[in-house]
Amino acid sequence: MEIRIQGVSKHYFSEGKTIKALDDVTLTIPANQIFTLLGPSGCGKTTLLRCIVGLESPDSGEISIGDEVVWSKDKGIYVPTEERGLGMVFQTYAIWPHMNVFDNVAYPLQTRNVPRDVIRRKVEKTLHFVQLEGFEKRPATKLSGGQQQRVALARALVAEPKVILFDEPLSNLDAKLREETRKELRTFLTELSITAVYVTHDRIEALALSDSIAVMRAGRIIEIGSPQKIYFDADHRFVADFIGRANLIPAKVVQQTENATVVESPLGVITCQKRDLAVGATVTLCLRPEFIRVAPGSGEEGANVVQGKVETLVFIGEAFEMEIRAGGELLLAKVDADTRTQVGDTLHFTLDPAHCLLVAV
Ligand code: ATP
């Protein structure tokens, strides 16, 4: 079910100051997608989620879920949370320690006076789905973090919501379990074809889990796109920088060819991905560390070849991370683990034009 947010603003007043948590947000979350709100702490992700849920009332604007307007200041509409047809999973799973797994999952149905045999059937089906069959009688406290997370997911799903919302649901898991659980979660959600809105400040989680990502800053949506679009082809410097490690170098457009935009930069003249920019425009060249490659052989001077001196070298298992001084800039590069290089070496590096991204300053 599609969610439409139109012109939503929200201010808080705290200690004599006004905080603009949401600043005229307009956004459509497509049906049956995993849609992530990503951004730094305090950018308004949770506030937007709470407005969709109905735990927070915006100051202005309109929110619709499917065909139903659930909030409109102008039309005086407020549909209470429990009537919005939503499931929710939060950072603290909020599963009840004094109940067993069955009762935790059954709770949302019990509060709606669903007949007992229907409850049993639905709980069993949902526990089967989240692979917790046989755990019905287990006290909630005797579960691992990952299992507790699945109980919370089952409880959010049991009433067959139209939309499911997640606020940093994996934050309390250790790194390995987080990775496993997010893979599992993507499988579950894709299988269900349900609209899922997911809040996180973790870029890897957003990239791994989402169909679409909306990057937020200071109460605004800066850019929306698929994980690949946001990572490889962002329009904004803030987005390119936030979504992954990036070398950001000042540059100036000097030529437009049929397939490429050419810039002048401290690294020399660099041929980049084609962008619709005026010759003379000041831009930022964004280079991901993994696309700075050691030139084969001794490395010849040429197009998109940069000479640099290795200043630091760190072995991280699958690769080396090296800092290179080139044209006065310090670049971070991630190169093959079998590279035979030492600190102090001067090397040539190639920059693939397809991965030389130009973003606004
Ligand atoms: P985080 O990733 O840290 O959870 P977030 O992006 O979810 O951050 P929000 O929780 O939506 O951000 O907060 C947005 C802004 O509104 C922040 O500046 C926050 O301090 C402020 N804020 C949120 N809730 C309240 C409140 N109840 N009273 C006052 N200010 C609030």
Image (cartoon, rainbow, N blue to C red):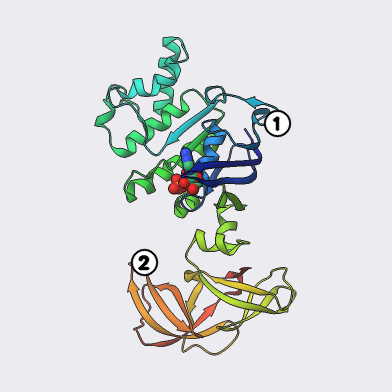
Q: Is residue 266 left or right of residue 181?
A: right
Q: Is residue 152 above or below residue 120?
A: below
Residue nearest the viewer, comparing 339 with 212: 212
Q: Nearer the viewer, mark 1 or mark 2?
A: 1
Q: Is residue 8 above or below residue 139?
A: below
- Mark sitting on residue 74: 1
- Assign a secondary structure to mark 1: loop
Q: Look at mark 2 in the image and give the residue it sits on.
A: 318
| Residue 36, position as x, y percentages in the image | 53, 46
Q: Cβ of disc 2 within 8 Å of ligand 1?
A: no
Residue nearest the viewer, comparing 301 with 84: 84
Name the residue rendered at 33%, 50% in the picture: 176
Q: Earlier in the sequence, mark 1 or mark 2?
A: 1
| Residue 101, position as x, y percentages in the image | 32, 25
Q: Is residue 252 above or below residue 102?
A: below
Residue nearest the viewer, comparing 50 with 73: 73
Name the residue rendered at 37%, 45% in the picture: 171
Q: Is residue 111 left or right of residue 237?
A: left
Q: Amino acid at mark 2?
A: Glu
Residue 194 visible to the viewer: no
Name the residue rendered at 56%, 24% in the picture: 80
Q: Is residue 353 left or right of residue 291?
A: right
CA gap, disc 1 and disc 2: 56 Å
Q: Are marks 1 and 2 in contact (CB under 8 Å)?
A: no
User: How would you rate the neighbour count of disc 2 (Cα within 10 Å): few for under 14, some for 14-19, many for 20 or more?
Assistant: few
- Assign a secondary structure to mark 2: loop
